[in-house]
Image (cartoon, rainbow, N blue to C red):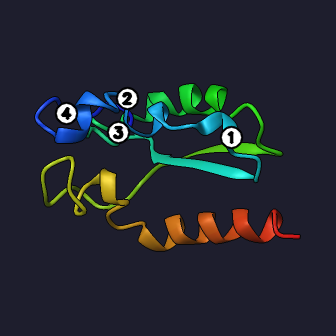
Amino acid sequence: MTRTPPARAIATSHPNGVADLALSEITVPTLIMSHRNDSCRATPPADAEMLKRRLTKTSKTEIVLIDGGDPPESPPREAKAAHGYFGIEAKAVDTIADFINRNSN
């Protein structure tokens, strides 16, 4: 979440969601993954680059924007839409596992 809805209690301290955390303290390889067609207003894929810029001390930062999946069966912010990698869950998990495997010591 990079755009916290104003109605959420956390919005007062973290209006930019995870982007307001101490990302500059992270030093391990970091994967930023989103569905290219995620239309949830709180998690726009376009914010991936902003997150990457704030991860200034990681040994590696990779952005992956996934495509595809099934037609949505839920609102944009829920699991049965692009937000939840609906229809391509295995592809999302494989992408994460691959990143971990490539960056393990």
The residue that label 4 is drawn on is 5
- Measured in 3D between alpha carbons, the distance from the residue under mark 2 to the one under mark 4, in whole angstroms, is 9 Å
* Comes first in the chain, label 2 or label 3: 2
- SS of the residue at dot 3? loop
At label 4, counting other C-alpha atoms closer than 10 Å, the crowd grade (few under 14, some 14-19, many 20 or more) is some
Q: As displayed, is residue 72 above or below residue 19? A: below
Q: Decide which of tag 4 and tag 1 comes sooner along the chain.
A: 4
Residue underneath mark 1? 25
Residue name at image x 60 percent, y 38 percent: 23
**Residue furthest out toward the right:** 105
- Type of residue at label 1? Glu
Q: Earlier in the sequence, mark 1 or mark 3?
A: 1
In the rendered image, the quadrant that contains the N terminus is top left
Q: Secondary structure at mark 1?
A: helix
Tell me which numbered mark, 4 or 3, is placed earlier along the sequence.
4
* Residue 26 drawn above or below residue 88: above
In the foreground, 67 or 7: 7
Answer few, some or many: residues within 10 Å of disc 1's Cα (few below 14, many 20 plus, some between 14 and 19): few
| Residue 71 falls left or right of residue 37 | left
Give residue 103's position: percent from left, percent from top. Answer: 81, 62
Residue occupied by mark 3: 43
Q: Position of residue 82 (x, y in %)?
A: 32, 52
- Pick the quarter of the image with the C terminus: bottom right
**Residue 60 figure quarter:** top right
Element type where label 4 sits in the image = loop
Give x and y (percent) for residue 16. Answer: 37, 29
**Mark-to-mark CA distance, 4 and 3:** 10 Å
Task: Report the Cα–Cα distance between label 2 and label 3.
Answer: 10 Å
**Which numbered marker is on residue 16?**
2
